[in-house]
Every structure is written in structure tokens, then in C-alpha cells.
Image: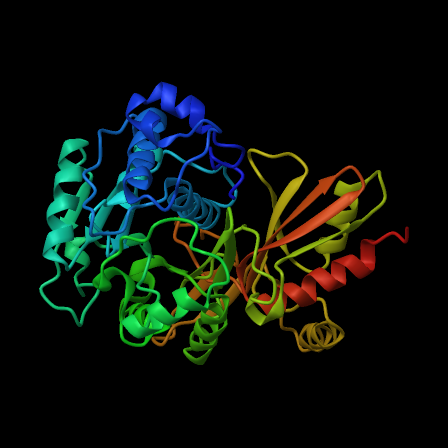
Amino acid sequence: MHPRNPYRTYLDFRKLSIDCPDFAPYVDANSKVNFHDPAAVRCLAQCLLKRDFALNKLELPEDRLCPMIPNRIDYILWIQDVIDTSSCDILSEIDRTRQVVGIDIGTGASAIYPILACTLRPSWKMYATEIDSHSYAFAETNIESNHLTHRINLRQPSSSTQLLPSDLWGEQNIDFIMCNPPFYGSFAALEAATAAKTAPPNSACTGSETEMVYEGGEVAFVGRILEESLALRTRVKWYSSLFGLRSSVDIFIGMLKEKGIENYTATEMHLGKTKRWAVAWSFGDRRPVVPGLQGCYPHGIRGEVEFTVKNEGQEEMVQSLLKDGGFLLTTLKSRPRVWYGEVREDTWSRAARRKKARDRAAGMDMDQQFITDKKGNGEEVCEYPSTYNENGEEVFVGMGFTIEVVEDKMKIIWRRGDGKLFESFAGMVKRKLTVDV
């Protein structure tokens, strides 16, 4: 589970039954719960939300999915990390109080994702969609009973063929999209998957066919989000979805690559005996600083390189190494001994150094920190390969990175731009500064 998940350690059902007497009938003499009893699963969800999040009792119909609260929180916490580490000013401390707008596609009867998201972050606002009228009615009740109608905007799509409106309901930009899609391609596939399990399911499944089944399965459903993201592009910072099968993740990442999307991240969530996966993708150049899923790195690049350096003079080493390369290197405001750097293009490889020498010999000065270019009308403009130019406008950079030194360890993290450029740069720094141990 996620390090911030409050249920990461042992969940004491006996104590919960004392804190929430409604749950007591479902806890046996050995402090265990029968998760095959749908009533017990519903009561557990309601009591956890009441005790740990001060939420009013959710109305959960017997014929719709009942959310397992620890599982749902894991996805939200991961989304928080993706947004926090890729959307803020890299030079500043993460601002967890800033306003964030998200969308939950197919929120279900519980509306659990938007309700928890807004509870965990009071500055967040959510849109939630639900096409099934029965689930929509319950979601509306749950949002109203928890006094969140001013922060959660529930929508019922008029068309089953479009998941997101082109106008994004009047929002100029959306920070993220999340989705827990139907996993199975047919009801027969659902039954076959259940029959193939060597052990009984961990808990009762009360999901409807609408919630569990979609023609083509989860890959086809999330593939629709991908197709719609190609039109919206940077109007949404991060698109994401859960997956129930590891093989689906590999297929979907292949689809991202086919569309030329290389800024993505994936994770695995261990939830007791259950595993789930999530993938997020973006048309921007900011990289989230989150643990990646083995074998699912963009360009095969982990995005983080750590190695041993001398235990003294690290700051001088970093400054000296990057000075000749023309990097813009800035100490982070909130963290000493951590530097953020940017570069527009390769300046360190042998070929790049030879080109630079030829340019200088020809009287051309292509210093990375000040590049003169011409617009179509012949007007000269100056570009700074930094996060912001002199007018405070965000501009293109080839690659951005942070360098952090803790004792004798140096860590280089990919933060923006071209992954292959980062890999080349990090390899160069490691060769120059590494210490054999």
C-alpha cells in the first residue's frame, strides 16, 4: 500500500466494532470478518468512512459495487503524488493547498473517489460522471448528504459514445482524470475468470454488469479515454486509469507509444491479496517523481540515477562540472544541497563539444543560457532554456533535472523533457563524479 495510506498496517476490526457499534455483529469471536457477506462489506466501508474521515453514512445499494476503502485511497494518494511533483514550480516547495480540478469517469453509486479526494484535500474540486441512472441517483444522495455539492459536480452523460465533453464543462484546464473501468469484455469472461480462480474471491462482488463488463474489456474502455485525450491534449495535465490485469498495462502502454506519447508513468498497488495497476499519461513535459513499475519506463529509462561521490566538496563538483556546459543551475528554495538544472540540447557529448568548437570558430555563440532566434517576421527574440523567461512565461526546455547530494550519495532525477537526453546527461555525470567502492 501507499506509504500514506492509513490502513497500511493492521486494521483492528475489534476496535472498529467498538468505535462503530453497527459493525459489531459482523466481527466474530476471533476478531475476523466474513468478507463473503455483502452486508458486512457495506457496513465496513460505511464505518471506516464515518470513523476515519467524519463522513456521513453512504447509501450503498445491494446491487452495485461496494468500495473497499483502503483500495480506493491508494489510487487517490498516487494521483496526489503525480500532481504534486509535476505541476508545481519545481524550484519551490510543493503546494498541497492549491486548487486542483479533477474528473472521475464512471463514479458509481458511492461516488467514493470524488468524495474521498475532496475530503483528503479541501482545496480540490471534482467532476464526476455516471451514465447509469440507478447509480447516479445514489451518487447524488451521497454527495448531498456529505455537503459536497459545492465541490463535486455530478454529471450524467447524454451519450454513451463520448466519455469527456470537448468543452470540459467550461473549465479551461483540468489537472487530472481518473477512472476505475469495467474489467471484463463480456459477462461470460467474468464468469470464466471467477471459475478459473483456485481460491474463492477475497470478498463479495455485488457489481452490476454495467460496472463490470464492457465490450473489449478494460483496454478498450481506457483506449476510448486515450482517443479523446488526443483532442484535449494539454487541456488536461494528467489522464489516468486503473487496470485489473498486468497484461492490460503492457498492451495499453504499447498503445500510448503508437500515438507518440512518451510521458507516462505506471504503478502497482498491493492491496492485501489483490493487485491493481494504474497508468497515467500526459502531453506536457513535466515528469512526476513517483516510483515506476518495473518494465514500464518511458524509453526504458528509470528516471533516477544514484551513485557514490566524494564526501566533501560536492557543491563545487556540481558547479564546476556543469559550468562549461552552459547549464542554468539553481539551488531549490526549500531544500539546501539540491539543485535544479535545465538545458535546451545536448552540450556534453563528444559530438556536441565538437559542434560547439566549430560554431565558436565561425563566430557563433550558442550559449545555453541566452539563445537568439528569429520569428517568422524576422523579429529577434531571446529564449531562456529555463522554466520561465524574463516575462514570467513558461518556455520549452530540452531537459530538466534535479541533483541532490546526501552525505556521499548523489541522486539525479529526470524532471522535464526528453528522457533520452536525461539518460545521456546522467550517464555523463556519473562517469565524471562516481567513486569506486
Tell me the quarter of the picture where residue 252 sits.
bottom left
Where in the figure is residue 316, as x and y percent of width and height? Answer: 78, 43
Where in the figure is residue 114, as x and y percent of width and height? Answer: 27, 44
In this view of the protein, which residue sits in the foreground, 223 or 99?
223
In the picture shown, does residue 437 fall above or below 232?
above
Tell me the quarter of the picture where residue 293 sits.
bottom right
Residue 311 shows up from this direction: yes
Number of marks present in the image shown = 0
> Coloured how?
rainbow
Tell me the quarter of the picture where residue 216 sits.
bottom left
Where in the figure is residue 323, as x and y percent of width and height? Answer: 71, 54
In the picture shown, does residue 215 fall above or below 237?
below
Residue 121 shows up from this direction: no
Residue positioned 45% across, 68% down in the render: 196
Most extreme residue toward the right, as rendered? 437
Most extreme residue toward the top, as rendered? 18
Most extreme residue toward the bottom, as rendered? 258
Residue positioned 19% across, 58% down in the render: 168
Most extreme residue toward the front, as rendered? 29
Left or right placement of residue 75 versus residue 399 in this view: left
Left or right placement of residue 365 versus residue 125 in this view: right
